[in-house]
Amino acid sequence: MLNERTKKILFVGGFILSVFGIAFTLYFLFFKPAPPAPTVEDGSEISPGGLPSALEGLIRETVDDTTGSPTGLVEADDVAQGGLTQTTELTTSAVYDLVLSNDGASMNYYNSADGRFYTIDENGNVVALSETQFPNAETVEWNKDSEKVLIEFPDGSNIIYDFSAEKQVTLPSHWEDFDFSPVADEIIAKSISLDPNNRWLVISSDDGSNTTSIQALGENANKVDVNWSPNDQVVAFARTGGALQGGLDRNVIYPVGQNSENFKGLVVEGLNFASLWSPNGKQLLYSVTGDYSDNKPLLWIVDATSSTMGDNRHSLGLNTWVEKCTWSSSTTIYCAVPLDLPSNAGLQPSLYADEPDAIYKINLTTGISTLIGIPAESTSMNSLQVSDDESLLYFSNDYGQLEVMRLK
């Protein structure tokens, strides 16, 4: 039994401990200073298979030189350093069908307002490629030297125009879905007649002569994507295979050659396959959408020569569409990656066409993707082109205007 003195001592001691406990709790909840904000370095890198981390930490505040305190204004770099970056609008209205000029530094484009083609440099100096007008051009393809255009019009007429020779050639109206050869003065097209038995993939000289039928299309013309490889081995891809064992997301894409080659099929993990050849034709960059990526678009890379078709296939870990990418060399890719994409965005790309983007550089040698820059004025970035010296990145913004970001 405890005597009265002991009970009093224990009671007082317990009371003192409870006071300290309550005081510590109040301090922890209301008065403890917040931990320092995490530091995120510019030029953040991600490895293949990972998704880009949140970008908010890359926005830097301007610091007042006199007080050392943040001013609340965001500082943007003139040259891309991995954070917010200044861009320059080069045109005041929308332009279309952008391609790097044959000088490797300026851009060619189509102006739908007057139906003419122009070239423009990084300082906004504009020169008409020709005084000839091509009103209401529907689709435009440029040849390998950016000196010829193949134009499809809404009435079904098709022409090739040579800016150097100022010469125009008319092509059959039942041809469609054109592409220029990357190595010769040739074109490929789908010859679509009323009879499905007479629908073919054809190759001809770019003056419309010497036409050769290379692949019957039948009822599958809309499942064939013309895409001529730089090494001249593949001219198209056919999405005529069904789902493979392992899920509805797994499909096979069949490469099409010029001489009925029996190429190995490409197994892709998703739907909405779209692709972009490397400059040497040895690899294929593509995007697909599947359940495994929450139905967001995801970039993949794969070997794609006649002897390596399908080898070394792996994800690059970036949720974007291949149409937002461009190769600057056979080992380097630049891509515009949406800052935020909800689930299922890959199933309806048109709904997310105006999502603001950031620019990533993919180094295939190291396998690392690096954040290069975020436009200071948020915008979607499309039709990317990089100058030959990799100092300028051109793109079209939300309104179709041409802009440039300095990389060096």
Image (tube, rainbow, N blue to C red):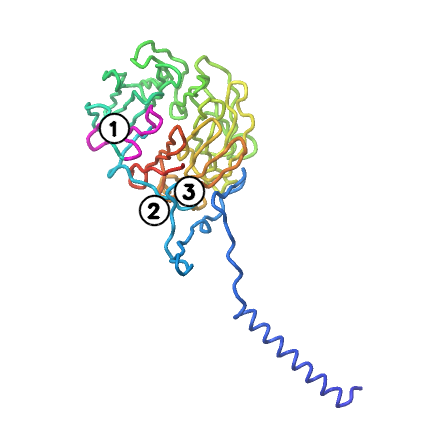
Give coordinates of residue 234: x percent, y percent.
45, 19
- Whether tag 2 and tag 3 are in contact, CB under 8 A, the answer is no
Q: Name the secondary structure under disc 3.
A: strand
Does the magenta portion include 110?
Answer: yes
Query: Quick one: which residue is furthest to the right in this view?
Result: 1
| Disc 2 residue type (three-letter) | Glu
- Indicate the quadrant where residue 402 lies: top left
Give coordinates of residue 18: x percent, y percent.
64, 78
- Dot 2: within a 10 Å radius of its alpha carbon, few (fewer than 14), some, or many (20 or more) residues? few
| Disc 3 residue type (three-letter) | Gly
Measure the C-alpha gap from mark 2 to mark 1: 26 Å
Instruction: Say which residue appears at 76% left-offset and 86% top-offset.
Output: 6
Give coordinates of residue 156: x percent, y percent.
25, 23
Q: Name the secondary structure under disc 1.
A: strand
Query: Quick one: which residue is furthest to the bottom in this view?
Result: 4
Measure the C-alpha gap from mark 2 to mark 3: 12 Å
- Whether tag 3 and tag 1 are in contact, CB under 8 A, the answer is no
Q: Name the secondary structure under disc 2.
A: loop
Name the one closer to the observer, 392 or 321: 392
- Indicate the quadrant where residue 13 lies: bottom right
Query: Which of disc 1 and disc 2 is earlier in sequence?
Result: 1
- Tell me where the magenta segment starts and ends, as one range: 100-123
Left or right of residue 297, residue 10 in this image: right
Does the magenta portion include 57?
Answer: no
| Disc 1 residue type (three-letter) | Tyr
Residue highlighted by disc 1: 118
* Image quadrant occupied by the C terminus: top left
Residue highlighted by disc 2: 377
Residue highlighted by disc 3: 373
